[in-house]
Amino acid sequence: QVQLVESGGGSVQAGGSLRLSCAVSGNTDSSNFMVWFRQAPGKEREGVAGIYRGGSRKYYSVSVKGRFTISRDTAKNTVYLQMNSLKPEDTAMYYCAARPFYGLIWNNPADFGDWGQGTQVTVSS
């Protein structure tokens, strides 16, 4: 099991930027693959970006590709999500999640057993 703690959320105006952090502790072998998800009220949880342990492969949802960047500092056991050109539709609770395997489908929430508590991102127009 691994413990995940998100930080960095807040309120910004459209066009602004935020950087989210996810600190990983515990059995880090369970965090070979990590994903940032988000969930807005009344909507399903959506995977926005995923990254392999060494950062060799990254995945992005269509809705954030070109605006968000996921990265990973293995020395600090931290995963980041740099969010630029934020839009009101990016408003959501953002969660990081971890799993030990890579797999073919990167963004199915049911495949992740370890989750952080979430950090709120609010983008105003």
Image (cartoon, grey):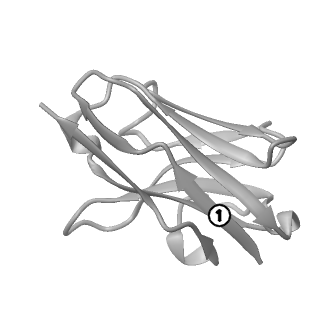
- Vertical placement of 85 versus 99: above or below? above
Can you say which quadrant of the picture contains the N terminus? bottom right
Specify whether 125 is left or right of 30.
left
Name the amino acid type tagged 1: Leu
> Does residue 111 appear in this view?
yes
Q: Nearer the viewer, residue 38 or 110?
A: 38
Residue 73 picture location, percent across and down: 78, 38
Residue 12 picture location, percent across and down: 27, 32
What residue is rendered at 31% in x and 23% in y?
A: 16
What residue is rendered at 22% in x and 43% in y?
A: 89
Specify whether 83 is left or right of 112.
left
Residue 11 picture location, percent across and down: 27, 39
- Vertical placement of 48 versus 115: above or below? above
Residue under numbered circle 1 = 4
Point out the residue furthest to the left here.
Answer: 125
Can you say which quadrant of the picture contains the C terminus? top left
- Vertical placement of 18 versus 114: above or below? above
Give the SS element for disc 1: strand
What residue is rendered at 81% in x and 69% in y?
A: 30
What residue is rendered at 79% in x and 49% in y?
A: 77
Q: Nearer the viewer, residue 42 or 60?
A: 42
